[in-house]
Amino acid sequence: MFEIYQSEKTKKFHYRLKAANGQIILSGQAYKDKPDCARGVESVLINGADENRYEIKEASDGRKYFVLKSSNNQVIGKSQMYKSESGLKNGIMSVGNNIADSRLKVLC
């Protein structure tokens, strides 16, 4: 399920994709307004099923994460940090599986 929410601190809009267990598996950038944030969700729906759109990155502490990129190579989402390669690959699969459930909950 996708959720759109507004940060109380910055007043900007964000989206997150949650797995069935409630864990956040992908987070979007900050958007100035809600319609732009909704377009970010649409971009994830379009690009998230394509394995070639995922790029694996490594943090300074050695943990890995992935970003999802749009067709114009812009980052549209970022994962949590993973301790193992298998966990990271499962995370990518989870995004693909969970975008099929394109329900959207607007929290603001």
Image (spheres, grey):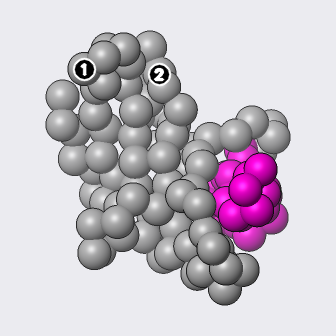
The image quadrant of residue 99 is bottom left
Quadrant of residue 57 within the rendered picture: bottom right
Residue at the spot 80% in from the left edge and 37% down from the top edge: 72
Q: Which residue is mark 1?
A: 8
**Mark 2, secondary structure of its residue:** loop
Q: Is residue 40 on the magenta stretch?
A: no
Q: In this rendering, is residue 78 above or below 74? A: below
Residue 58 at what x, y percent from top left? 78, 57
Find residue 92 and report its horizontal and vertical position in percent. 61, 71
The one nearer the camera, 5 or 9, is: 9
Marks 1 and 2: in contact by CB < 8 Å?
A: no
Q: Which residues are magenta?
A: 46-70
Mark in front: 2 vs 1: 1
Residue 31 image label = 2
Q: Quadrant location of the N terminus?
A: bottom left
Q: Is residue 33 left or right of residue 80?
A: left
